[in-house]
Amino acid sequence: MTTPLIGLTMGDPAGIGPEITVKALADPATRGRARTLLLADVGVVEQAVEVAGVDLTVRRVAGPEEVTDDPARIDVLDLATVGSVEFGQVAAAYGKAAVASIELACALARERRIDAIVTAPISKEAIRAAGSPFPGHTEMLAELFGVPGDRVVTAFVLDQLRIFFLTRHHSLRDLVDLLHTGLVLRGLRRVDELLVDLGIERPKIALAALNPHAGENGLLGSEEREILEPAVRAARDEGIDATGPVPADAVFYQARHGRYDGVLSLYHDQGHIAAKTLDFFGTVSCTLGLPVIRTSVDHGTAFDIAGRGVADASGQVAAIRVAAELVPTVRHG
């Protein structure tokens, strides 16, 4: 069986993305799992190889069809946008280059010339300076693939812990106003569908609570009784094995130890804190619901250490591994 071909985006060239990517490609743990095509400026990749101190040869290719599985070589589809960079700087040119890499990855995936996408960290400030209207990767990918935003779900995968997010980039002040029973029910339905796609029959899903002690029967907030509990009841009426709301200070521990197959987190930091505390570098972010698997590390550009050769690449190694493992779960329409 042919190993999957994964397209690797460059990320912000002034951050640690290129460095952790070339380090991951030099890591024996990635060899044999997939063939890889780096969508980046050759100059940026050569600079990253020097910074990382890895013994790999950079080779320009004209397209995915030229990619081999030679572990001593990095195959690069040259974007030729910025060349070498000044590390740690926010610049519109770097944001534009990062977006160009993502757009190319999506184009190749739409043509089914690559099997999965692994994205490196981008700077939201830089892509905004470049004119991008998107707050992050997920929203951009949904638009580029023409998938409705409510069909695309961010999930964290860390060993047996799977965390799904009902909402993404919203303030806590806005979150409470956004929550309603229909939104939560749709989230539970989507998580159930995605876990089945991942090969889990009759998945057990936990809904994280919003308030301390799951609201303590209304003493610490009414959202559990008025919004979350009705959504869980409705989901169970539809045959979904949903439980909750479960106090957020316990639910992730319980899921990690096998009580649940997935947790639906209500907001960004609720799930991020749990995953990053457990394993900051090993947490893999997956975007599910697209016509292709997309994974990434769950950390940012780390401008403060960019160019020093000290970035930890274990998250990128894990992102490539998870992408390769999930390729068979994608159902093409």
Image (tube, rainbow, N blue to C red):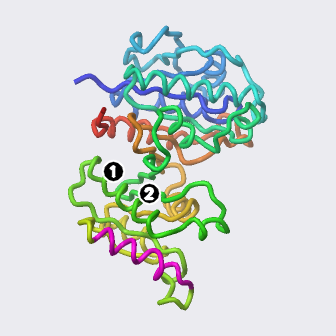
- Residue span colored magenta: 221-236
The disc label shown at residue 215, or none: none
Give the quadrant of the C terminus: top left
The disc label shown at residue 194, or none: 1
- Secondary structure mostly seen in magenta is helix
**Which corner quadrant of the image does residue 66 belong to?**
top left
Total marks shown come to 2
Answer above or below: position of 172 versus 117. below
Answer above or below: position of 314 versus 193. above
Among the two numbered marks 1 and 2 on one chain, the one whose residue lies closer to the N terminus: 2
Residue 122 is situated, as x and y percent measured from the top left of the image, at 64, 37
Q: Residue at x 54, y 79 (%)?
A: 211
Q: Nearer the viewer, residue 261 or 282?
A: 261
Residue 157 is situated, as x and y percent measured from the top left of the image, at 41, 51
Residue 288 is situated, as x and y percent measured from the top left of the image, at 41, 45
- Does residue 219 appear left or right of residue 259 in this picture? right
Residue assigned mark 2 = 164
- Quote the CA–CA distance across marks 1 and 2: 10 Å
Q: Nearer the viewer, residue 298 or 313?
A: 298
| Secondary element type, mark 2 | strand
Which residue type carries mark 2? Answer: Phe
Is residue 122 magenta-colored? no
Is there a contact, CB below 8 Å, between mark 1 and mark 2? yes
